[in-house]
Every structure is written in structure tokens, then in C-alpha cells.
Image: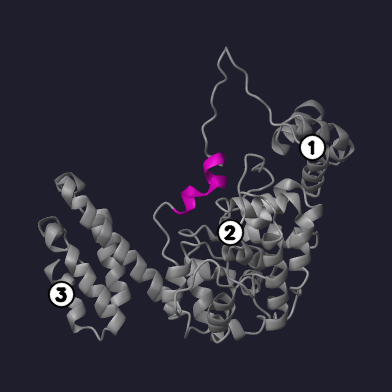
């Protein structure tokens, strides 16, 4: 371990990397006895690899039973420093990476970042993108803007709608969206469905989006500015090849990775000029659509900007924290004798949309198509699509 801890001294560290290294060393003395007990077999020769290795060893190989309570704080700070450094370095890599490297790295993140599930979300959004927000059922609209609800039936929404950037904390945004989705449709109408988005088109979107908030006459919302983060989610869902979806908590690390000045959650100009402007200087972004290649590569290319999210270090349980996975793997609870489960009723419009979408599956038997109204009734009363179809199979199959 001593050799590993001192190895960055022999590396050609940049000024920022040396700063990070010195920060790491600040937390080592309080953990030294525990760290020295770890057997080290790998000695990376680059700083990114070194951060990965030290994080892995201090997280997975450290004997937690030997730690004193007062050592937990420096250990947490050590992990936070290493994780931030890894994310920053991986994002920095995108500044010079050609498409082939960008593509390979994203593929390697499949398990850690739940890439397959994220792509199911993006494919679903692509299917409903032709509809205005004002005409979507509530579940679809929330999927588009990134807010999970108990109405998201996992037999239809087989993904966490909050991947990339959750907006569940943006209460005023959701209040305004529910009251006036047409206004958000108007803002998004300025963003073209293909071709590069121009500064003028982005500016028109921003003006229309900010007007929604400035026109709000609610006393609770008085003086509140239009937040940037939910706007980036809207933009990235409509054009995942042009925009990156942010949360207030991710702004800092993305700014560090792209070596741009940190901006706040209301700075629409910096988002466009600094962040999107920097992304547009990257070789992988300028890559033309892949030809004569696998379909999965073309899918990643079509979503290449929003997939920058995968260059952030994934927590060990990142994939398991998905709302979809947690609901899918949730153990079935037996109903108590004193209380029966309460079905969540849906509107007829919502039930119809969910049933019609399920019936598009070509593998379903023909007789189920004639049971559409029955299925709608079952779903409207609270059953999931999966439960309603299983019931029909049991009766008529």
C-alpha cells in the first residue's frame, strides 16, 4: 500500500491532478494503519487508474470492523475526493476522444450504469416524441420530464423515468406543467426535430420557457426564476443528440470535467455557450452517422450527448437503485385479513393508451385483440397491463 500511495509522485501530474493527490493524502494519516493492512497487487501507471484502484481497495478491501467511529468521516471524504476525480477525468477524456473510443467506453458501462434500461427509456421517449406534452397521458408526460410516480406500471414502463436527470424536486416546474402544458409545448416547438440546433432557436426556447415562470401569479412562486435543470431535461429528451440533461447537483462536476467556469441553476447563457459550445468542439460529436454497422452503435450515436451521463462514475448500487428495478424485485406482500390492497384507478384515456400500447406486441395471441374493451376496464380499475393480460390468458387461453 505504501508503494501505491506514493506512486503518483512519479507520474506527470497536471496542476489539478496534483491538487487532488494532495487532498487525498490529507485523509490517509487517520486511516494509515487500516490501509496498510490491505494487500495491493495492482499498481496503475496513470493517475485515473490510480484513483480507481485506491477507491476500490479502500471501499471493498478495508476491514470496516477495525475502524473507529471517528475514522468514518475521513474515509467518506477520501471516497468523495476519489469519485469526483474519476468522474472529472473521464469527462475530460471526452474532450479529445474520437467516436470509436467514446462508443467503446459507453458500451463498457452497460452493467454499472444500466445502459440497456436507459436505452429503453430513450426509445420510449422517441416513440412518444411526436405527441405534444398537452396530449400525452399523465404517465407519459412525467416520463418525458423525469418524475417517477406510482402510476408508472412496470409492465409498460420497464425503465426508471428518472435516469439522466430527475426533476422530482422542481415543484413549481411540475405545478406549471400540470396547469399549462401547452406553454411548454410552445417553448419546445422552437427546437427542430433534426439538424443542429442554432443559437437563435435555443434563445427562442429559453425566452418562451422563462415567460412561463415570469407570468406565474401564484403568491408562493412570486420572485422565483425559471430553473435551468428542468429545461435541460426537456431539451435532452427532445434532442438527445444535441443537449445534456443536468441536475443542480451535477452542474459542478460537468463544469470541472469540461474545464469551464461553474455556473448556477439559472444561467441559460452559460449552459449554451460554455457547456454545449464545448461539447460541439469534440470529435465524437462531429462524427457522422455510422454506416454499415450494428444497430446498437447507431442508437448510441443518435443519443450521444445525453449519454455523457455515463462518463460520471457509477456508484456500486447505481443500477439497483432504479425505481423500475426496485419495483420489479419488490417481494410480494400477503394481504392481511384486516385490509385488502387498494387498486389505483386510472382515467379511461390513460387506460386506453396503456392497453393499445401493450396490444402492439406481435407475440400476443389474436384473441386478445378482441378483448380490448375488457382489458381497458381491468386496467382502469387498477390492474396492471400484465395482470389483465394474464387474466385473459387464464380464461380464454
Task: Name the residue furthest top.
Answer: 337
Which SS class for mark 2?
A: helix
**Of circles 2 and 1, which is in front?**
1
User: Observer-nearest residue: 332 or 131?
Assistant: 131
**Of circles 3 and 1, which is in front?**
1
Residues shaded magenta: 318-327
- The N terminus - image quarter: bottom left
State the separation of the CA atoms marked 3 and 1: 63 Å
User: Observer-nearest residue: 337 or 224?
Assistant: 224
State the separation of the CA atoms marked 2 and 1: 28 Å
Q: Residues within 10 Å of mark 2 (few under 14, many from 20)?
A: many
| Circles 2, 1 touching at the beta carbon (< 8 Å) | no
Q: Does residue 285 show up magenta in the picture?
A: no
In the figure, is residue 50 to the left or right of 118? left
Q: Residue at 76% x, 29% y: name it.
A: 381
Q: Residues within 10 Å of mark 1 (few under 14, many from 20)?
A: some
The residue that mark 1 highlights is 347
Task: Classify 74 as above or below 368.
Answer: below
Locate residue 93, reporting x and y percent. 43, 80
The residue that mark 2 highlights is 118
The residue that mark 3 highlights is 6
Locate residue 168, reporting x and y percent. 57, 50
Magenta stretch: helix, strand or loop mostly: helix
Residue 100 is labelled as none
Label 2 or label 3, whichever comes before in sequence order: 3
State the separation of the CA atoms marked 2 and 3: 39 Å
Amino acid at each position: 500500500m505504501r508503494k501505491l500511495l506514493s506512486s503518483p509522485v512519479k507520474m506527470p501530474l497536471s496542476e489539478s491532478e496534483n491538487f487532488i493527490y494532495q487532498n487525498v493524502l490529507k485523509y490517509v494519516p487517520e486511516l494509515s494503519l487500516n490501509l496498510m493492512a490491505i494487500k495491493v497487487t495492482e499498481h496503475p501507471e496513470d493517475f485515473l487508474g490510480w484513483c480507481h484502484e485506491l477507491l476500490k481497495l479502500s471501499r471493498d478491501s478495508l476491514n470496516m470492523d477495525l475502524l473507529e467511529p471517528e475514522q468514518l468521516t475521513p474515509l467518506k471524504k477520501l471516497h468523495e475526493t476519489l469519485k469526483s476525480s474519476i468522474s472529472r477525468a473521464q469527462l475530460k477524456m471526452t474532450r479529445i476522444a474520437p467516436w470509436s473510443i467514446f462508443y467503446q467506453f459507453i458500451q463498457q458501462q452497460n452493467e454499472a450504469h444500466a445502459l440497456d434500461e436507459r436505452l429503453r427509456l430513450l426509445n420510449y421517449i422517441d416513440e412518444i416524441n411526436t405527441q405534444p406534452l398537452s396530449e400525452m397521458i399523465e404517465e407519459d408526460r412525467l416520463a418525458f420530464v423525469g418524475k417517477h410516480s406510482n402510476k408508472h406500471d412496470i409492465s409498460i414502463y420497464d425503465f426508471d423515468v428518472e435516469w439522466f436527470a430527475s426533476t422530482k424536486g422542481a415543484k413549481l416546474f411540475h405545478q406549471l406543467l400540470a396547469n399549462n402544458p401547452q406553454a411548454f409545448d410552445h417553448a419546445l416547438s422552437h427546437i427542430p426535430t433534426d439538424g443542429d440546433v442554432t443559437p437563435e432557436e435555443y434563445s427562442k426556447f429559453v425566452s418562451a420557457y422563462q415567460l412561463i415562470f415570469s407570468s406565474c401569479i401564484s403568491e408562493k412562486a412570486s420572485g422565483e426564476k425559471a430553473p435551468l435543470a428542468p429545461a435541460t431535461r426537456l431539451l435532452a429528451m427532445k434532442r438527445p443528440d444535441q443537449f445534456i440533461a443536468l441536475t443542480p447537483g451535477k452542474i459542478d462536476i460537468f463544469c470541472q470535467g469540461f474545464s469551464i467556469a461553474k455556473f448556477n441553476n439559472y444561467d441559460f447563457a452559460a449552459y449554451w455557450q460554455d457547456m454545449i459550445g464545448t461539447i460541439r468542439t469534440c470529435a465524437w460529436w462531429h462524427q457522422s452517422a455510422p454506416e454499415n454497422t450494428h444497430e446498437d452503435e447507431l442508437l448510441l450515436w443518435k443519443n450521444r450527448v445525453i449519454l455523457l451521463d455515463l462518463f460520471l462514475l457509477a456508484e456500486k448500487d447505481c443500477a439497483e437503485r432504479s425505481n423500475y428495478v426496485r419495483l420489479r424485485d419488490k417481494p410480494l406482500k400477503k394481504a392481511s385479513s384486516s385490509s385488502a390492497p387498494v387498486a389505483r384507478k386510472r382515467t379511461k384515456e390513460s387506460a386506453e393508451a396503456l392497453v393499445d400500447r401493450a396490444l402492439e406486441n406481435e407475440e400476443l395471441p389474436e384473441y386478445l385483440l378482441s378483448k380490448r374493451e375488457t382489458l381497458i376496464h381491468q386496467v382502469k380499475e387498477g390492474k396492471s397491463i400484465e395482470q389483465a393480460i394474464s387474466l385473459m390468458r387464464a380464461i380464454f387461453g
